[in-house]
Image: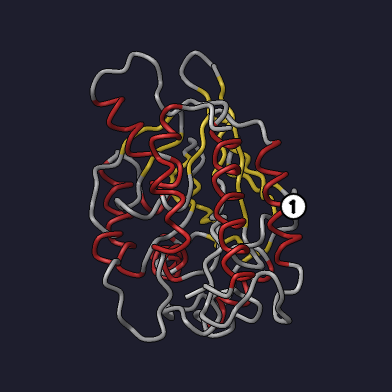
């Protein structure tokens, strides 16, 4: 049951993501320009800011000792992200860690340039680290293997284990293995506090959409045999997380722009706060996976 009005408004977009998010066998990307549309950076809550593009999230979590950036968008997104960080009044070179959700070109494409220019350490899962080192050439087990665009490689990422935390200054962020969309998906959680020391639980939940290459079948395959178990683990984990504010790698999947519009229209409450957001996100993802499995059983997968 979807208990949030804002999330119910976002269901048509989110349910369609599994078929809208494209896979690419060549260098074309008709939707990339749309994804990379610039937007002004803004505060989500406390020391957490949105610094990404219109269709691809990047978050900045700040501290006096340095900052943590989450996700790098497309290769073309790197300058936009850096500019947004500076526009907020922060120094780009104060970014000390860059965390990744999953190693696809639309979330990891800008990592190499962002890390090189800032001097920050890139942190991701062991599987994603292999993909980053190859620039997307090594994607064994990925449901979209062989169809995705390549991106600039980063040869020395740091890896984290499930439940491990990383920190800069007093800011601590915890990694959670949430596979399914890729074998190496990571979600990240932390607390952000306002000036009155009122803290909220922040969740950057990785993509849970069952997007696949033409011959991949979630119901039966040899390259990622535990994909359904990984999805179920991810569903249960994200649904159980303390979750006041949810952000996702594709912001429309968590109704970010509907919330932003409500804020700009003068909503006196914080429209980003929704304790049911993670529950609703999982409910939508479950429906998308069920739809995909039903299509596979019926033999109607495109």
Q: Residue at x 67, y 71 (%)?
A: 127
- x, y percent for residue 274: 51, 26
Query: Residue lying farthest front?
Result: 298
Image vertical order of residue 175 relative to residue 64, above or below: below
Foreground pick, 239 / 15: 15
Q: Residue at x 49, y 36 (%)?
A: 63
Q: Quadrant of residue 289?
A: bottom right
Q: Quadrant of residue 200?
A: top right
Q: Residue at x 51, y 52 (%)?
A: 96
Mark 1 secondary-structure assignment: helix
Quarter of the figure that contains the N terminus? top right
Decide if residue 108 is on the left or right side of residue 31. Answer: right
- x, y percent for residue 54: 29, 50
Image vertical order of residue 236 relative to residue 220, above or below: above
- x, y percent for residue 84: 29, 48
Q: Residue at x 54, y 72 (%)?
A: 212
Q: Name the image colouring.
A: secondary structure
Image vertical order of residue 106 relative to residue 39, above or below: below
Residue identifier under label 1: 233
Foreground pick, 251 / 132: 251
């Amino acid at each position: 049951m979807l208990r949030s009005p804002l999330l119910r408004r976002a269901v048509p977009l989110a349910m369609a993501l599994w078929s809208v998010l494209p896979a690419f066998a060549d260098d074309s990307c008709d939707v990339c320009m749309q994804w990379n549309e610039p937007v002004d950076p803004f505060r989500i809550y406390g020391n957490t800011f949105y610094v990404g593009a219109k269709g691809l999230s990047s978050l900045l979590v700040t501290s006096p000792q340095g900052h943590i950036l989450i996700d790098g968008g497309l290769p073309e997104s790197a300058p936009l992200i850096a500019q947004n960080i500076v526009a907020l009044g922060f120094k780009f070179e104060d970014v000390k860690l860059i965390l990744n959700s999953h190693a696809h070109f639309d979330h990891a494409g800008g990592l190499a340039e962002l890390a090189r220019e800032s001097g920050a350490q890139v942190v991701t899962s062991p599987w994603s680290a292999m993909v980053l080192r190859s620039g997307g050439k090594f994607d064994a087990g990925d449901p979209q293997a062989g169809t995705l665009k390549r991106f600039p490689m980063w040869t020395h990422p740091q890896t984290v284990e499930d439940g491990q935390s990383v920190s800069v200054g007093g800011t601590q962020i915890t990694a959670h293995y949430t596979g399914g969309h890729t074998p190496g998906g990571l979600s990240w959680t932390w607390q952000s506090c306002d000036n009155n020391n009122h803290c909220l639980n922040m969740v950057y939940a990785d993509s849970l959409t069952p997007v696949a290459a033409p011959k991949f079948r979630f119901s039966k395959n040899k390259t990622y045999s535990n994909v359904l178990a990984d999805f179920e683990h991810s569903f249960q984990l994200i649904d159980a997380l303390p979750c006041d504010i949810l952000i996702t790698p594709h912001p429309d999947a968590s109704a970010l722009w509907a919330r932003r519009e409500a804020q700009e229209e003068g909503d006196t409450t914080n429209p980003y706060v929704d304790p049911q957001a993670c529950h609703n996100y999982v409910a939508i993802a479950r429906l998308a996976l069920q739809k995909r499995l039903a299509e596979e059983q019926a033999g109607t997968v495109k």
